[in-house]
Amino acid sequence: MAIKVGVVGYGTIGKRVADAIAKQDDMSLVGIVARGYDWRYAMAVRRGYSLYAAESARMEEFEEYGIAVKGSFEDLIQESDVIVDCSPKKVGASHKPFYEKYGKKAVFEGGEKHELTGVSFNSSRNFEESWGKQFTRVVSCNTTGIARTVGALHEKLGVKKARVVLIRRHTDPWESHKKGVINTVVPVLKVPSHHAEDSKTVVKDLDINTIAFSTPHNMMHINAAFLEMKSNVEKKDVLSVLEEENRVVFVSGKDKVEALNSVFALARDLDRSRGDLYEVPVWEESISVNGNEVSLIWATPNEANVIPENIDAIRAITQSLPKHKSIEKTDNSLGILKKLY
Amino acid sequence: MAIKVGVVGYGTIGKRVADAIAKQDDMSLVGIVARGYDWRYAMAVRRGYSLYAAESARMEEFEEYGIAVKGSFEDLIQESDVIVDCSPKKVGASHKPFYEKYGKKAVFEGGEKHELTGVSFNSSRNFEESWGKQFTRVVSCNTTGIARTVGALHEKLGVKKARVVLIRRHTDPWESHKKGVINTVVPVLKVPSHHAEDSKTVVKDLDINTIAFSTPHNMMHINAAFLEMKSNVEKKDVLSVLEEENRVVFVSGKDKVEALNSVFALARDLDRSRGDLYEVPVWEESISVNGNEVSLIWATPNEANVIPENIDAIRAITQSLPKHKSIEKTDNSLGILKKLY
């Protein structure tokens, strides 16, 4: 029987999670939660999604714009087996008591703290840890990027120390006119940035330090790592680990993929919904190896790279499919590629 | 019998024209012209498009990357009934002698001068003028935007004077890392900008002045017009002209469509290839009317708004479908909407 999933929060992640759930033949989307009218909810209705009203919903707007509301936030919880809560940071945490009240399982996102759930999730690194749990938390886009790249190298070759720089898009496109920065770079002055600790929730025993910046672009993050490996490695070993890693792809300047805007342009050419990229593109020529030192550059498509993880997390907590079968099913349903071009 | 169309130039416009042709049941895409290897051609091959080598092609790259080449630029011309030439400005013009040599019809783009073809094209304004011609020229994105908005108001209500400001994205996403401007606004110091004269090639007898700027964003243009009408009008008349106009849609800040990034985000939610927008969105609340004065703001989605015009232009010069039937067929094939949400 299909797992009934409700989605709470309909921003960058929520709407993509809802679409991904709708594509799974072992899941059904119960509905989404709306706060009031705007174009996003009009489009959700066009997609055939049922709307449930948030506690703080502006009900008069639904009426004014003729948008049918199927029930309340708590109705959605009761009708669902699992909730994926993609609400803004801390708002998700505030919903946990509701999920507990009805004894429902829930997946939270990386905006929430690890302590909220006591277990965090990355498909390839620690799927099993969330097996059968009531709650789990999919780590953030950046941590997911680190888990897939540095995490894979740690698991397969052994990383002694990872020193990672995260150059982040300041805001997603849809709200760039309200939350932008202009012509500046904003360092996160707390070092390590929270990503270091967060990475350890899914890649255990990783010695990692992270430094983060925000820059005035809105497409995705770009990251670089200096790795000291436990022993000398060869470039072909690094290439082969990343080549075999799920949801990691190679791109290259020799193919004229030269910057984040190139990645964005090629993602749009894939004809996926919204031009989304679930994969983490690693620049092949950026992989430099010298004895036990490895460095590399990758992009983190922050709007979509955690979407497959959310689908797998639902299967893990509901014990419905083991790791590799879930990853394979998710990747097939979303058209995830090993070569983008 | 399907019209055999070859596409020369595979940048922002060319690749979209190729895709649009492939969607028409009365056309077949003969192939595209490539200069060398990069990810765009790898993707074109994946789409099943035949590649023909440009005069200046780097043939060794095709070999190195195992990309099959079906013939030369001149082979493509000979195998086609019509060429759509989406080459960069002036390069298109340099190809005209080849089309003449083989007696083939061709559609040029707005980068070329009106004098190249002697006739320019906008579907709603002057479809018939290109009927049966050997060559026509689809006016640029901005001129197309003006033709659909100001042009419609001129045709239906009578514009005495149009004063239009064009705030243009400096570069398209795929080459933004090479041709950008940062933290500045670049005025086009020639006033009127070329758009004024260009608009008159498709909207005859329009008194228009245009001032253009480039700004550091890469998504689409945003434009504003001050119109002096020939007589007093009412807002409802303006609304109804634009509502009835093909390829014009309303958006509104009250639906939280508040900036170009909002338009971009909602376009991506339409699940079209590349998140393309063929329609020109007009902000409904920006339409202010005072006696015989009208002002309005619209976005010009420069990557895609001329694509339907290119398809109609092919039908006009080949005399294969009359205006309204062509527009309807094009709009159906591309999923063009009268309401985006």
Image: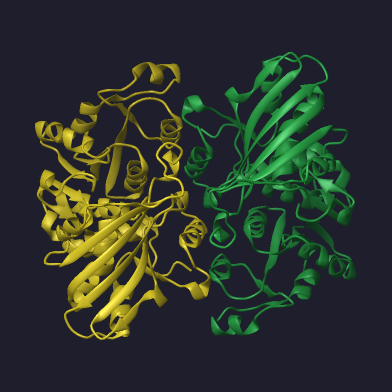
Chain colours: A green, B yellow
The spot of residue A234 in percent (x, y) is 71, 14
The spot of residue B315 in percent (x, y) is 20, 52
* Residue drawn 11% across the image and 57% down it: B129
Q: Is residue A338 left or right of residue A195?
A: left
* Residue drawn 17% across the image and 37% down it: B93
* Residue drawn 85% across the image and 43% down it: A201
Q: In which image quadrant can residue A161 be found? A: top right
The answer to whether residue A14 is above or below residue B314 is below
Q: In which image quadrant can residue B288 be found? A: bottom left
Let me know if residue B325 appears in the view. Answer: no
Q: Is residue B155 left or right of residue A105?
A: left
The spot of residue A130 in percent (x, y) is 86, 47
The spot of residue B275 in percent (x, y) is 47, 53
Nearer to me, B23 or B263: B263
The answer to whether residue A119 is above or below residue A90 is above
Q: Quadrant of the N terminus of chain A?
A: bottom right
Let me know if residue B7 appears in the view. Answer: yes
The answer to whether residue B131 is above or below residue A283 is below
* Residue drawn 64% across the image and 71% down it: A50
The answer to whether residue A67 is above or below residue B61 is below
Nearer to me, B91 or A25: B91
Q: In which image quadrant can residue A202 be found? A: top right
Nearer to me, A332 or A69: A69
Report the number of numbered marks: 0
Q: Is residue B171 left or right of residue B310?
A: right
